[in-house]
């Protein structure tokens, strides 16, 4: 309402003075609060890096079995060895599906997963029989906490910091967040998988683990590594891009053995772009999504550590871009761009640009370093959906190309893709139940349960002990998978990607192609294998933890250099500008790890 | 001088030839006017084309989009994406939750804003202090973790739909606007109500608020739009997707790009594509606001100027 009575000048001056006093008082209170906050949060000294126990010698489970079929994954071998395992552990069961006495108590687990709104549900929103079978077998239930790929890190941090985390936490530690994981352990936020050795399948998996053993902290396993299913390719990243075979054939440069030399590949891509099969200048040679550009299109062979820390050649470590060969890699990328091999709009690339342009008949090759049987099948299937009149088998092929050093570049991968941690507040009984469930899921039968469905219903063992799918068939001859949304929760136990090879929906030509590509990547005479430096990958340090690898900055810089008039100068200047930022991390690493 | 086009010449400079000649289309059309119309039309097309393109993509099959990403007219239109969206269980859940948040939240916001703003116009003890404290929250917050702990552990609103309604009771900007508007109203009307024996609440609801209908409409509209777009608190506090607002489902779907269809085994997937589903979902969630906005546009414009501090 309108004010009355006071004179304007007197009221104004009085009001102004009052406001100034109040502002001063508020400023003082705020400063005091900030100082108190700093005093409270500071101190406590340096956070010492948590030490990990020396890993026990890896033993081959195969040595202990006599019945395991040859060539199977370690999971198969552990089932046979389970019979000879300790009797004190709860049995990894292949037995009856009715809850045994030990499962009399119904336990509900909260679990954070990606795609929680679909996890374990069929198309009508009901719990899938596949998941219900697990529930009935172990008398459990899951309540899924939702995560998305762009918020899962922050959301997990928030839950942990506020003591509001679910029982089973999808931790998904990237290497640079390992220090966070260790800190969570030290803060008592996670429950260890105590005595996991008593569970034969868990023990067998951990016994042959490599990088997965990093989650043993202070002698206890604090997160279950969701092991990758790389039994075929031995954790060697298969860096074969897929490309238009017909265009290569038209150029007269097609190699049927899936291997191109660097010169052959370079000439092929350049020729295809010049011939412009897409018409009207629309043919694109290569598109790189972030990491694939500096790593997998040839420059990675010159500088495999361009995106990370790596050996400096003197027994120590340095930041990859600081290595002299990284400049050579940048020059090569720039040359490829100037020669028209790389998409002119690479600077603005989005994830879907590769598939859309390839399926739309405008792109020659797509880098796919995580080639899996299912992924390869999807390439052909997706192309067919977009081009119904085409025969993708005749148009698409996968191939390796040698780098400028004459070798096919392959990185050793982690043996796991994510981790499942337990909340420290989980009761001991619930933790034991979860370990029992997990032990089943990583067993031989559990592997096929995740991949093929309910044993005895959706698949069975044939006379030779091989699993055979019993999937229903659709009218068009394709097979109907018995579960729709097992992925969000099941893969946190273990991935079963290679099981795609035995699924009835896997086309024979994909099986054959996958096998040929695996044979190549396992040939040490053809491949330059970049091993995982476990000590470095899981290094914990204050400076290293805060600086990281600056990988995102490197991508951005490399993309910008494509259109630079002075790529070499810009790169050198950028690298030098980052030197003071990364030097503390380099010093910290070398202080701990330099030989 | 004779009037032309209804203009009566008064003392003063003659209006420009362009003004006297009027709009385009007359004999001797005006070049600057034509240029302005052309420029503004092109600008409008540039602004509207992405929406138009989104509509076209939502009706296009995947193979058409991949071959022709920049659609100018419908090609082989299909309702597959819309069927997918409307069959999607989360849409109904999201719509239900958002509707609840919209109705209850907007009512709560407007009521609280009206009451608080009215109180701040009264000479209550500590009025300046309360006003400063309220203003303080415009610039400073307690931080995400304390806020999360407070909502979750202290007042136990976590994982309930009320976490998206109760904590955001008042928008400070709306409060200030409302307060300023109250101060423009004549004091005498409220005084006469008091003389007649009306208490403060009765004065507010029977006398003052009826006089503030334009302002109330503006505040209601702002609050309603904010409630409709609610997703942040849903992401923060909701652990059950049953409580997700519609915008959070949409946001998750867009953030996941192809997650809607990617995790379905390829043998099971319907023949829809993620881009079309995204566009269809955007159109579906945008449609209610787009339909209502033309009728409420004047309130948006008015709201910018209403409640401005008068002399």
Image (spheres, coloured by chain):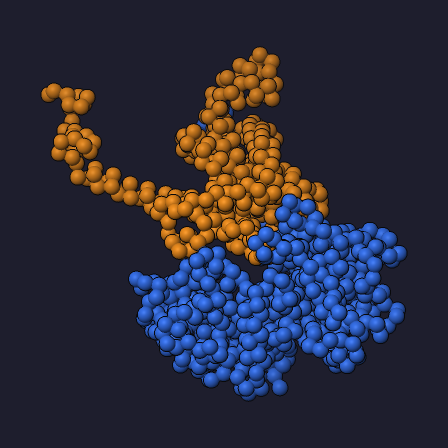
Chain colours: A blue, B orange
Q: Quadrant of residue B109?
A: top right
Residue A505 place in picture, x, y as percent: 60, 61
Asked whether residue A299 appears in the rendered view, the answer is no
Horizontal arrangement in the rendering, residue A101 relative to residue A118 (left or right): right
Residue A404 place in picture, x, y as percent: 44, 82
The quadrant the N terminus of chain B occupies is top left
Q: Nearer the viewer, residue A482 or A177?
A: A482
Q: Is residue A178 above or below residue B15?
A: below
Residue A468 place in picture, x, y as percent: 69, 64
Q: Residue at x 79, y 73 (%)?
A: A80
Q: Nearer the viewer, residue A448 or A211?
A: A448
The quadrant the C terminus of chain B occupies is top left
Q: Quadrant of residue A158?
A: bottom right
Q: Residue at x 59, y 64 (%)?
A: A506
Asked whether residue A99 appears in the rendered view, the answer is yes
Residue lying furthest left in this view?
B1
Q: Residue at x 64, y 80 (%)?
A: A592
Q: Nearer the viewer, residue B136 or A307?
A: A307
Horizontal arrangement in the rendering, residue B37 relative to residue B163 (left or right): left
């Amino acid at each position: 309402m309108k004010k009355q009575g006071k004179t304007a000048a007197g009221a104004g001056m009085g009001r102004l003075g009052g406001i100034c006093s109040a502002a001063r008082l508020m400023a003082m209170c705020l400063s005091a609060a900030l100082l108190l906050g700093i005093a409270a949060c500071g101190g406590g000294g340096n956070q010492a890096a948590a030490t990990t126990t020396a890993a026990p010698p890896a033993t081959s489970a195969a040595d202990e079995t006599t019945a395991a079929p040859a060539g199977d994954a370690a999971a198969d071998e552990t089932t046979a060895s389970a019979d000879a395992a300790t009797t004190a552990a709860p049995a990894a069961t292949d037995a009856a599906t009715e809850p045994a006495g030990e499962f009399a108590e119904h336990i509900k687990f909260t679990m954070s997963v990606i795609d929680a709104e679909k996890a374990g549900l069929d198309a009508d929103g009901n719990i899938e029989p596949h998941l219900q079978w697990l529930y009935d077998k172990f008398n459990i239930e899951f309540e899924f906490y939702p995560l998305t790929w762009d918020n899962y890190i922050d959301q997990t941090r928030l839950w942990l910091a506020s003591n509001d985390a679910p029982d089973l936490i999808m931790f998904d530690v990237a290497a640079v967040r390992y220090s966070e994981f260790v800190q969570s352990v030290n803060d008592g936020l996670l429950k260890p998988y105590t005595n996991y050795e008593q569970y034969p399948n868990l023990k067998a998996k951990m016994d042959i683990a490599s990088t997965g053993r990093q989650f043993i902290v202070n002698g206890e396993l604090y997160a279950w590594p969701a092991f990758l299913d790389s039994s075929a390719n031995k954790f060697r990243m298969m860096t074969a891009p897929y490309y238009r075979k017909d265009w290569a054939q038209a150029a007269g440069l097609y190699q049927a053995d899936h291997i191109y030399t660097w010169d052959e590949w370079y000439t092929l891509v350049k020729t295809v772009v010049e011939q412009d099969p897409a018409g009207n200048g629309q043919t694109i040679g290569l598109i790189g999504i972030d990491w694939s550009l500096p790593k997998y299109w040839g420059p990675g062979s010159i500088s495999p550590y361009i995106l990370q820390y790596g050996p400096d050649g003197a027994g120590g470590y340095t930041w990859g871009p600081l290595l002299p060969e990284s400049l050579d890699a940048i020059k090569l990328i720039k040359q490829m761009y100037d020669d028209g091999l790389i998409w002119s709009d690479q600077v603005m690339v989005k994830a879907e640009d590769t598939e859309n342009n390839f399926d739309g008949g405008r792109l020659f090759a797509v880098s796919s370093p995580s080639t899996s049987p299912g992924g390869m099948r999807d390439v052909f299937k997706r192309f067919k959906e977009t081009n119904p009149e085409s025969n993708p088998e005749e148009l698409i092929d996968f191939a390796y190309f040698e780098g400028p050093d004459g070798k096919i570049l392959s990185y050793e991968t982690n043996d796991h893709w994510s981790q499942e941690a337990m909340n420290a507040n989980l009761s001991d009984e619930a933790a034991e139940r979860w370990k029992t469930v997990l032990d089943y899921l990583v067993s031989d039968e559990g592997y096929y349960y995740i991949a093929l469905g309910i044993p005895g219903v959706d698949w069975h063992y044939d006379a030779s002990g091989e699993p055979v799918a019993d999937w229903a068939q659709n009218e068009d001859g394709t097979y109907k998978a018995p579960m729709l949304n097992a992925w969000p929760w099941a893969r946190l136990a273990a991935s079963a990607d290679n099981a795609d090879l035995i699924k009835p929906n896997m086309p024979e030509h994909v099986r054959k192609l996958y096998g040929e590509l695996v044979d190549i990547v396992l040939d040490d005479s053809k491949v330059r294998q970049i091993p995982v430096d476990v000590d470095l990958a899981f290094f914990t340090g204050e400076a290293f933890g805060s600086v990281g690898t600056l990988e995102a900055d490197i991508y951005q810089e490399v993309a910008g250099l494509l259109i630079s008039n002075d790529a070499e100068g810009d790169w050198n200047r950028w690298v030098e500008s980052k030197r003071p930022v990364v030097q503390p991390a380099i010093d910290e690493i070398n202080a701990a790890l330099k030989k | 001088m004779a009037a032309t086009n209804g203009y009566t010449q008064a003392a003063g400079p003659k209006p420009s030839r362009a003004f006297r000649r009027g709009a385009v289309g007359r004999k001797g059309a005006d070049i600057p006017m034509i240029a302005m119309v052309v420029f503004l039309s092109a600008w409008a097309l540039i602004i509207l084309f992405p929406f138009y393109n989104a509509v076209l993509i939502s009706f296009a099959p995947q193979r058409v989009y991949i071959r022709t990403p920049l659609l100018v007219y419908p090609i082989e239109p299909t309702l597959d994406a819309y069927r997918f969206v409307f069959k999607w269980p989360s849409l109904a859940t999201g719509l239900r939750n958002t509707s609840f948040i919209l109705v209850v939240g907007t009512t709560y916001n407007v009521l609280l804003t009206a009451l608080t703003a009215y109180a701040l116009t009264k000479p209550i003890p500590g009025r300046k202090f309360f006003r400063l404290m309220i203003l303080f929250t415009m610039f400073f917050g307690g931080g995400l973790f304390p806020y999360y702990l407070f909502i979750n552990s202290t007042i136990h609103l976590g994982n309930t739909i009320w976490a998206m309604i109760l904590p955001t009771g008042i928008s400070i900007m709306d409060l200030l606007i409302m307060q300023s508007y109250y101060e423009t109203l004549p004091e005498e009307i409220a005084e006469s109500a008091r003389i007649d024996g009306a208490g403060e609440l009765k004065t507010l609801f029977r006398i003052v608020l009826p006089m503030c209908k334009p302002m109330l409409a503006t505040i209601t509209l702002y609050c309603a739009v904010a409630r409709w777009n609610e997703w942040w608190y849903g992401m923060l506090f909701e652990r059950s997707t049953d409580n997700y607002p519609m915008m959070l489902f949409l946001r998750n779907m867009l953030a996941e790009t192809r997650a809607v269809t990617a995790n379905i085994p390829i043998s099971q997937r319907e023949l829809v594509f993620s881009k079309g589903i995204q566009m269809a979902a955007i159109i579906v969630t945008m449609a209610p606001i787009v339909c209502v906005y033309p009728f409420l546009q004047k309130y948006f414009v008015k709201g910018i100027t209403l409640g401005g501090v008068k002399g």
